[in-house]
Image (tube, rainbow, N blue to C red):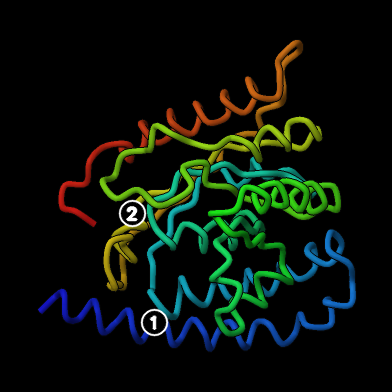
């Protein structure tokens, strides 16, 4: 019965998220006239409104946030986070005013892709080495233009609850080289709302987001060492929150 309810709720939720995407995209369409790297600081408000509509009147999540005071007053920062569910993206959009990297197929989802393109999402073909290079150049344009980005170094959502051992820190290194602020973050409970493994959604779940303080690059520290240190802090934060261990029940 619970599985059937979750599946039906997910189908209805998908419909609602598309409605919210349409409504949130219309007001920010005029910003398409501004070049990439300038419009995102304004258009991100549409993505934030969409994210609020998903979290509140769609899945009715019970949200806890910690450390939002660590967000820099000036835009152009990068947030590195663990990845447990699609809801992680929603939390980061709403509370850190950032957009992230997504697979190219998402760009063609009605209104959702357009909203992301306007507000700073980077779409790419995971199978193309050349496309990965374009992700870096696009990130440079966005960060230097004042847009905020978030990145999941694991690349995809965890299936067992534990953080992946193999991660990509390329964008963290790029942000370090640019002198942009790097912040560690961690989410928890999001897999109970929308798990990675099946078409399922459950309302009224407790979810959380913690944002750590910006971690400046140390003297004589390379960009790769800086990126690794930020990711290690994400790991420590995840361990403290108990979200680097196997799911009790597979999500």
Note whether 205 is above or below 112 in the view shown: above
Q: Mark 2 and mark 1 in contact? Answer it, CB < 8 Å.
A: no
Classify mark 2: helix, strand or loop: loop
Residue 143 percent coordinates (x, y):
78, 48
Q: Report the residue that reaches farthest toward the left.
A: 1
Residue 197 percent coordinates (x, y):
28, 61
For label 2, the residue is 189
Query: With 188 as the anchor, is 212 left or right in this view?
Result: right
Neighbourhood count class around disc 1 (C-alpha, 10 Å): few under 14, some 14–19, many 20 upward: many
Note whether 84 is above or below 18 in the view shown: above
Figure quadrant of residue 163: top left
Residue 121 percent coordinates (x, y):
66, 62
Q: Give me the residue at 55% from left, 84% from top.
A: 20
For label 1, the residue is 13
Neighbourhood count class around disc 2 (C-alpha, 10 Å): few under 14, some 14–19, many 20 upward: many
Which quarter of the rendered picture does the C terminus lie within? bottom left
| CA–CA distance in space, label 2 to label 1 | 18 Å
Q: Give me the residue at 39% from left, 52% from top.
A: 157
* Lower position in the chain sequence, tag 2 or tag 1: 1
Residue 202 appears in the rendering: no
């Amino acid at each position: 019965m619970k599985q059937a309810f979750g599946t039906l709720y997910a189908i209805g939720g998908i419909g609602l998220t598309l409605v919210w995407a349409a409504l949130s995209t219309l007001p920010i369409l005029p910003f398409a006239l501004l070049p990439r790297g300038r419009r995102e600081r304004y258009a991100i408000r549409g993505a934030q409104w969409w994210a609020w509509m998903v979290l509140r009147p769609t899945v009715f999540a019970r949200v806890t946030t910690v450390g939002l005071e660590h967000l820099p007053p000036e835009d152009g920062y990068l947030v590195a986070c663990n990845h447990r569910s699609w809801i992680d993206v929603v939390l980061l959009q709403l509370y850190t005013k950032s957009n992230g990297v997504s697979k190219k197929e998402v760009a063609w989802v009605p209104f959702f892709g357009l909203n992301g393109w306007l507000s700073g999402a980077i779409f790419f073909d995971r199978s193309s080495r050349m496309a990965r290079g374009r992700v870096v150049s696009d990130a440079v344009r966005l960060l230097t233009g004042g847009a905020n980005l978030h990145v999941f170094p694991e690349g995809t959502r965890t299936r067992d609850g534990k953080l992946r051992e193999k991660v990509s820190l390329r964008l963290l290194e790029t942000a370090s080289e640019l002198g942009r602020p790097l912040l560690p973050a961690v989410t928890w409970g999001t897999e109970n709302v929308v798990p990675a493994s099946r078409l399922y959604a459950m309302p009224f779940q407790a979810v959380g987001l913690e944002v750590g303080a910006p971690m400046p690059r140390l003297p004589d520290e390379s960009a790769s060492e800086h990126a690794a240190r930020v990711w290690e802090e994400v790991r420590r934060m995840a361990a403290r929150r108990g979200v680097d261990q196997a799911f009790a029940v597979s999500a």
